[in-house]
Structures are given as C-alpha cells and as structure tokens.
C-alpha cells in the first residue's frame, strides 16, 4: 500500500510541478487557457505558485505527514475551483482536470490512511 501511495504522490507532484513551471515561466498554454476561461492573466503566477506549493507539500508529506495532508487538501480545493471555472465558462473538456483531481484525491486519501 505504501508503494502505491508513493507512486501516486510522486506522479502527482511531477504533474503539478510541471504545470507550475509552465504557469510561472510564461508558457503560452496557461495564457490561452486563462483567456478561454475568462481568468485574468495576472492570476497565472498565483495559480502556478499554488500548484508548486502543492507539489512540494505532497513530497514533504513523506517526511511530515501533516504537510502532505495539508497539500492534498489544498490541491483538492484548487481543482474544485478549477472545475467551477471551467463549468461557468462553458468548457466541457475536463479530461485533464479529471486526471489532476483524481491524483490529488488519491494522494490525500492515501496520506490519511497510511
């Protein structure tokens, strides 16, 4: 069970860390998504920082379990907000969102259980 938790957590941290780098480095995709969803571009660095903090927090949860729980909770809330934004904007392409959300939920639940 611990190996599954470790795999989910590392995969999630890599995914969220990559997304954070894309947001913070000025990559074109986050800007296009922000424009499509009506999110101000000035929020992109803040959203990237939140993803980066979540990724680091998940990894820190290996050493301090409470940080992993806090990071997992924050990421779940982040993706609930992302879902609301997508739905309000009329965007129904939620495949990548579902993957990110499922990893955040799995990492949180496994961190609590283990």
Image (cartoon, helix red, strand yellow):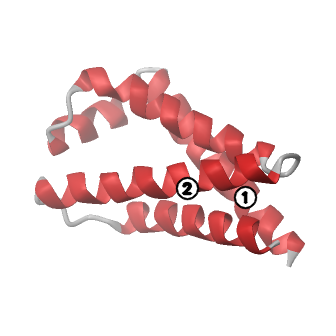
Can the viewer see residue 95 in this picture? yes
Can the viewer see residue 27 in this picture? no
Residue 101 at x, y = what percent?
Answer: 48, 63
Secondary structure, mark 1, is helix
Q: Residue at x 20, y 28 (%)?
A: 40
Task: Select label 1 or label 2 by which is in front.
Answer: 2
Q: Residue at x 64, y 64 (%)?
A: 108
**Quadrant position of residue 103:** bottom right
Write down the residue under mark 2. 73
Nearer to us in this view, 81 or 69: 69
What is the distance, in whole Å, between disc 1 and disc 2 at their CAs?
13 Å
Residue 93 at x, y = what percent?
Answer: 26, 64
Nearer to us in this view, 112 or 1: 112
Q: In this view, does 30 lie above or below 70?
A: above
In the picture, measured across the screen, residue 41 lies left or right of residue 89, that is right
Q: In this view, does 57 lie above or below 110?
A: above
Q: In which quarter of the image is the N terminus?
A: bottom right
């Amino acid at each position: 069970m611990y190996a599954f938790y470790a795999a989910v957590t590392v995969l999630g941290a890599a995914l969220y860390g990559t997304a954070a780098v894309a947001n913070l480095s000025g990559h074109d995709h986050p800007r296009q998504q922000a424009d499509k969803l009506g999110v101000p571009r000035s929020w992109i660095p803040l959203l990237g920082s939140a993803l980066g903090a979540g990724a680091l927090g998940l990894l820190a949860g290996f050493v301090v379990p409470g940080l992993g729980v806090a990071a997992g909770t924050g990421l779940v809330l982040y993706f609930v907000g992302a879902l609301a934004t997508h739905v309000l904007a009329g965007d129904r392409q939620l495949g990548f969102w579902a993957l990110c959300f499922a990893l955040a939920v799995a990492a949180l639940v496994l961190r609590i259980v283990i």
